[in-house]
Image (cartoon, rainbow, N blue to C red):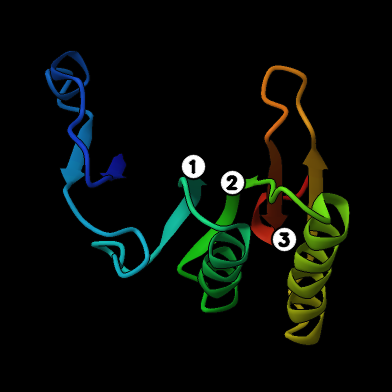
Amino acid sequence: RVEAIDNGEMADSLMATGLVDYHAADGFVYQPKEGHVDWLVCDMIERPERVATLMQKWLLTRLTTSCIFNLKLPMKRRFQIVDELLGDIKKSLEKQQIDFKMQAKHLYHDRDEISVIIRTSRHLI
């Protein structure tokens, strides 16, 4: 089951599959229909601080078990800002004793963002 949250429209071909519940909503205030999702995939065009804070909130409150998200790179201090944001997420998860693995990649095809995956204990192998 997939819930798609976007202020924009979904492709008709996707919606015709019947596999997606679409909600035209603000991703910063949306709450999952059933109170929890296994995977959150987030690709917002937004300041990296806002996205990192949102992902941290979803993980700490257990709205999601794991997530994949992109952090758009700021023009200045790119590495330092991303390092600080990921460090903040790591510290907060450790403080709540949530077992997790985090990986971040700067993918070749998109040099203006970092892709991050965080899997908590339920999805760890």
Q: Amino acid at mark 3?
A: Ser
* Residue placed under numbered mark 1 in the picture: 43
* Residues at circles 2 and 1 in contact by the CB criterion of under 8 Å: yes
The answer to the question of whether label 3 and label 2 lie on touching residues, with beta carbons closer than 8 A, is no
Quarter of the picture holding the N terminus: top left
Residue that numbered label 3 is attached to: 121
23 vs 91: above or below: above
Residue 59: percent from the left, percent from the top?
58, 68
Q: Position of residue 26 (x, y in %)?
A: 27, 59
Residue sitting nearer the eye, 82 or 96: 82
Say what secondary structure mark 3 lies in: helix
Q: From mark 3 to mark 2, how far is it between C-alphas?
A: 18 Å
Distance of mark 1 from mark 3, alpha carbons? 23 Å
Residue 81 against residue 9 in the figure, above or below: below
Q: For the residue marked with disc 1, what is the amino acid?
A: Asp
Front tag of 3 and 2: 2
Looking at marks 2 and 1 on the same chain, the residue that comes earlier in the sequence is marked by 1
* Helix, strand or loop under label 2: strand
Left or right of 65 in this view: 26: left
Q: Name the spot of residue 110 as percent of width and height, x first.
A: 67, 24
Residue 93 sits in which quadrant?
bottom right
Dots 1 and 3: beta carbons under 8 Å? no
User: Which label sits on residue 69?
Assistant: 2
Work out whether mark 3 precedes mark 2 in sequence or the reverse, and give the earlier one.
2
Dot 1 falls on a residue whose secondary structure is: loop
Dot 1, crowdedness within 10 Å: few (<14), some or many (≥20)?
Answer: few
Q: Specify the farthest residue to the top.
A: 13
Q: Residues within 10 Å of mark 2 (few under 14, many from 20)?
A: many
